[in-house]
Image: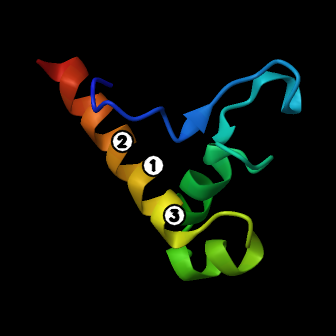
């Protein structure tokens, strides 16, 4: 993304068949978006997936938002 930081979401064919996951975990990013789309809170997601920190989740959402905005330019 050009932020100078590695992406917080990664894909590796050796981890969940290449499903995008939070870096350092086996938790798919899609699980977070599914929670939010279903009306659940970030707090509920974090309680269910304690290997994902609040900072990691919020930063990953921001990274995804910036990526989307960059694609619109």
Q: Secondary structure at mark 1?
A: helix
**Contact between labelled residues 1 and 2, with CB atoms less than 8 Å apart:** yes
Q: Secondary structure at mark 3?
A: helix
| Residue at x 45% of width, y 49% of height | 60
52 relative to 57 in the view: left or right: right
What residue is shown with label 1?
60
Label 3 to label 1, Cα distance in Å? 14 Å
Query: In which quadrant of the rendered view does residue 3 lie?
Result: top left
**Contact between labelled residues 1 and 3, with CB atoms less than 8 Å apart:** no
Q: Secondary structure at mark 2?
A: helix
Between circles 3 and 2, the one closer to the viewer is 2
What residue is shown with label 2?
63
| Residue at x 80% of width, y 46% of height | 26
- Expressed as whole percent of the image width and height from the top left, the position of residue 35 reads 60, 64
Query: In which quadrant of the rendered view does residue 11 lie?
Result: top right
Residue 41: in sight, yes or no?
Answer: no
- Say the numbered circle drawn on residue 36: 3
- Expressed as whole percent of the image width and height from the top left, the position of residue 54 reads 51, 71
- Expressed as whole percent of the image width and height from the top left, the position of residue 41 reads 52, 77
| Residue at x 68% of width, y 40% of height | 21
């Amino acid at each position: 993304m050009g932020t100078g930081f590695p992406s917080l979401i990664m894909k590796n064919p050796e981890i969940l068949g290449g499903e995008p996951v939070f870096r350092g975990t086996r938790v798919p990013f899609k699980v977070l978006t599914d929670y939010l789309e279903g009306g659940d809170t970030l707090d509920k997601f974090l309680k269910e997936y304690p290997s994902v920190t609040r900072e990691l989740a919020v930063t990953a959402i921001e990274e995804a938002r910036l990526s989307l905005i960059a694609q619109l330019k």
